[in-house]
Amino acid sequence: MAIFTALWSLEFLATAALSLGLIYWYLTSTFNYWKIKGVPYLKPKLVIGNLEDQILVRLSAGEMNQKFYRHFEGHRFGGIFSFRKPVLILRDPELIKQVLVKSFGSFHDRGLPYDEKVSPLSQHLVNLEGTRWRKLRVKLTPTFTSGKIKMMYNLMKECALELRDFLGEQAKKGEMVEIKEAVAQYTTDVIGTCAFGLQLNSMKDPNSEFRQMGRKVFEPSKLTMIRRMLMNMSIRLARLLNLRSPPKAVSDFFINAVREMVDYREKNNVKRNDFMQLLIQLKNKGRVDDDQTSGNYNESNDIENLQNEKEAEDLVMDDSLLAAQAFIFFLAGFETSSTTMSFCLYELALNTDVQERLHREIDAVLEETNGDLTYEAVQKMDYLDRTVSETLRKYPPAHSLGRKCTKSFKIPDTDIVIDEGIRVLIPVLALHRDPKYYPEPDRFDPDRFTEENKAKRPHFVYLPFGEGPRICIGMRFGLVQTKIGLAALLSRYSFKVCDKTDIPLKFEPKAALTSSVGGIWLQITNRLT
């Protein structure tokens, strides 16, 4: 009996040792990838790779990638590991151009994990890949022409003026305001009316369903961070654990909301100058009607294989695909613009000379229009444009750009071949804060974006919206929304630092996008005119 027990124990120990050995081999089998390729790399740790700073919530993802960027100083690129997956970090502007534009055919996918069967709203333009992405891009691109945006402009202006009026009492008393939440209510209202034709009144009702759903997606909690990391680790693991992005409650809400809106408009022949109307056109006609207000459409960043609309004819815009585009428009529209506006007002509060110069420009332009914030008036505000550009340099909402190698790629002037399936990372925040391109990068200086100063810098070191065929399709909309909101506020108010203002700001390590810890508190006062 003792012999059988001993043999069983030995067999158990051998099986356990073999199992542990196989697990260890699996977890470390990729760790020599960059060494074999001859790429400089950071030595990874078991299970977590090089993500220790983010997993332990010591740095935001953008700061962590900035740390990688600085580690490879003197190199054009370097290798890291996201858990066990090899990732190539790019530093050289010419190589970044190669990936985003010149060799786009080898890097046309972002490589973001999504599962449309589990999460129907994940099949949006940001996630989609290959031919399906290209066809959808062709269909959606005409919805964001300057003419279409001008059609929506008065809807934006109404929301901007409501924001200005909403803050009137606090300004009169010189109160402290958590400005990120205030402008997020404004951008939520803009997207609500421009995308869905709804008067959300988020400023009067900060707990409206749309506002709550936005918070659920971007809430910087450890749980959402862990969910995001597990999905990045393995989509199969995400399925096994029933992880969804967005959460089921958010997905159900948006799908039902879009379905009800489309049904109501089609049954009652309701038409509005908003994004939802353009999506309905795509669903019913397969295309968006030509602009009636801005002449011919031109998308300079698209390449020739995106200009043939015949490619997109067989893409069916069913309810779930339509809802997914409305969903990403809502998320990207309210969060990125509100973040940019709040960071901008923070910097203006710190740099009073910049704020005063901006006040003078806004006053001068509005004097010509009798105080009317027209589309043309906002476009004339050159210093405002530079101020927003400088804000996006210091605080790019998307701190990094990711691409997946879809066809093996030989790095120019080397013998190194990047294999299909390998992810490439462009650390935007790090590029924007590299003193080689932006001397004294922590200093806020809108004059970095005069035409003369822009011409001195290499291309592809300023990437707040990405570049190439996958550049942010809503870039124009986001910029107009941001500028009119800022112009409306600064035409009447001044912003100052207060006792609750964090100096310097700290980036939220649990957030998916560039965000500050604890919001942004400023004092708001009426201007003396």
Image (cartoon, helix red, strand yellow):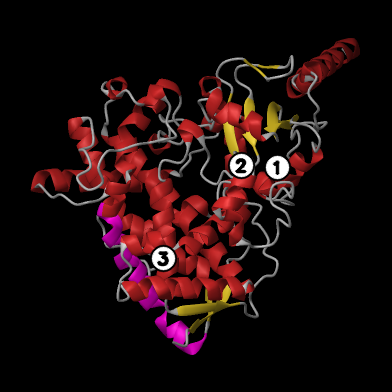
- Range drawn in magenta: 151-174
Q: Amino acid at mark 2?
A: Ser
Q: Name the residue at 63% across, 72% down.
A: 351
Looking at the image, residue 67 lies above or below residue 7: below
Which residue is disc 1 drawn over? Answer: 65
Query: Mark 3 belongs to which amino acid?
Result: Gly
- Provide the residue designation for mark 3: 485
Among all residues in the image, which is located at the extreme left? 268
- Is residue 168 highlighted in magenta? yes
For discs 3 and 2, the disc positioned in front in the rendered view:
3
Q: Position of residue 168 (x, y in %)?
A: 41, 82
- The x and y percentages for residue 288 are 23, 36
Asked which secondary structure carries label 3, the reply is: helix
Q: CA distance from mark 1 to mark 2?
A: 8 Å
- Comes first in the chain, label 1 or label 3: 1
In primary-sequence order, the first of circles 1 and 2 is 1
The residue nearer to you, when weighing 383 against 113, is: 383
Does label 3 or label 2 sit earlier along the sequence? 2
Label 2 element class: loop
User: Mark 1: which amino acid?
Assistant: Asn
Query: Is residue 221 among the parts visible in the rendering?
Result: no
185 relative to 501 in the view: left or right: left
Q: Residue at x 61, y 52 (%)?
A: 453
The CA span between labels 1 and 3 is: 31 Å
In percent of width and height, residue 419 lies at 65, 16
| The C terminus: image quadrant | bottom left
CB-based contact (under 8 Å), mark 1 and mark 3 = no
Residue 354, image quadrant: bottom right
Does 69 sit above or below residue 438?
Answer: above
